[in-house]
Amino acid sequence: MSSAANSDVDPRLLRSRARLLDAAAALLKSGGLEAITVEAVTRQSGVAKTTLYRHFDNIVDLRAATVELLLPSVIEAPAPGPLRDRLITLLDRQAAAIREASLQVAVLAWLATGAEQDAPALTALRQQLIDRYRVPFDQVIETAEARAVLGDLDVIAAMSQLLGPLIFTELIGIGRVTPADTVRIVDDFLYARTRDRGR
């Protein structure tokens, strides 16, 4: 909402929306997405159901707005340098972000397996999450050096190959991704890409 639009909105509506989102965020952190129900949010926030439905069409919209509120900021791309070093640094940062904010993993799992795949709020949130993850990869992979080494590469496919092991490890709880793991993931990725190109 723009500041002009905000000035036209009843402050009570802004407060009730904030209370609903605060309650939903607390429920999300303590019990996961399934803990966010209309009953639980209205009980915890003290806001009536009718007011909740003025702000959110359904529970999916409320969950999506809550997750959007808690999304981490975009991870900073590594400084210019050799492609391998930049990819390793980027994966180290991603691994740290996943460790520190398990919400990211929960969100990724929900978006990947959610029953409401076609809900507009969920579709928008999924795209926003992809865009946030994509920014630093674009900054590393869309360079002349990267194109020379990797060829014409789909950034989303590269993200899947590089982030997949990090997310999978965290999702199933088989341990922590170490710096040695990120080096191996990057080296395997680069080897496969250069081998496919006959280098």
Image: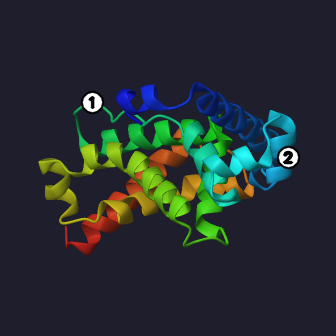
The amino acid on which the numbered mark 2 sits, given as a three-letter code, is Ala
| Residue receiving disc 2 | 40
Q: Residue at x 76, y 36 (%)?
A: 23
| Residue receiving disc 1 | 79
The amino acid on which the numbered mark 1 sits, given as a three-letter code, is Ala
Quarter of the rendering containing residue 28: top right
Residue 121's tag is none
Q: Residue at x 23, y 40 (%)?
A: 82
Q: Are marks 1 and 2 in contact (CB under 8 Å)?
A: no
Q: Residue at x 32, y 39 (%)?
A: 85
Please indicate whether residue 88 sits to the left or right of residue 60 in the image: left
Q: Secondary structure at mark 2?
A: helix
Marks 1 and 2 sit apart, C-alpha to C-alpha, by 45 Å
Nearest the eye: 89 or 155: 155
Q: Secondary structure at mark 1?
A: loop
- Between discs 1 and 2, the one toward the N terminus: 2
> Where does the image place residue 150, in percent across and percent down from the top left?
22, 61
Please indicate whether residue 86 sits to the left or right of residue 174 in the image: left
Nearest the eye: 91 or 70: 70
Nearest the eye: 194 or 31: 31
> Where does the image place residue 31, in percent across and percent down from the top left?
83, 46
> Where does the image place residue 121, in percent across and percent down from the top left?
53, 59
Please indicate whether residue 119 sits to the left or right of residue 48 in the image: left
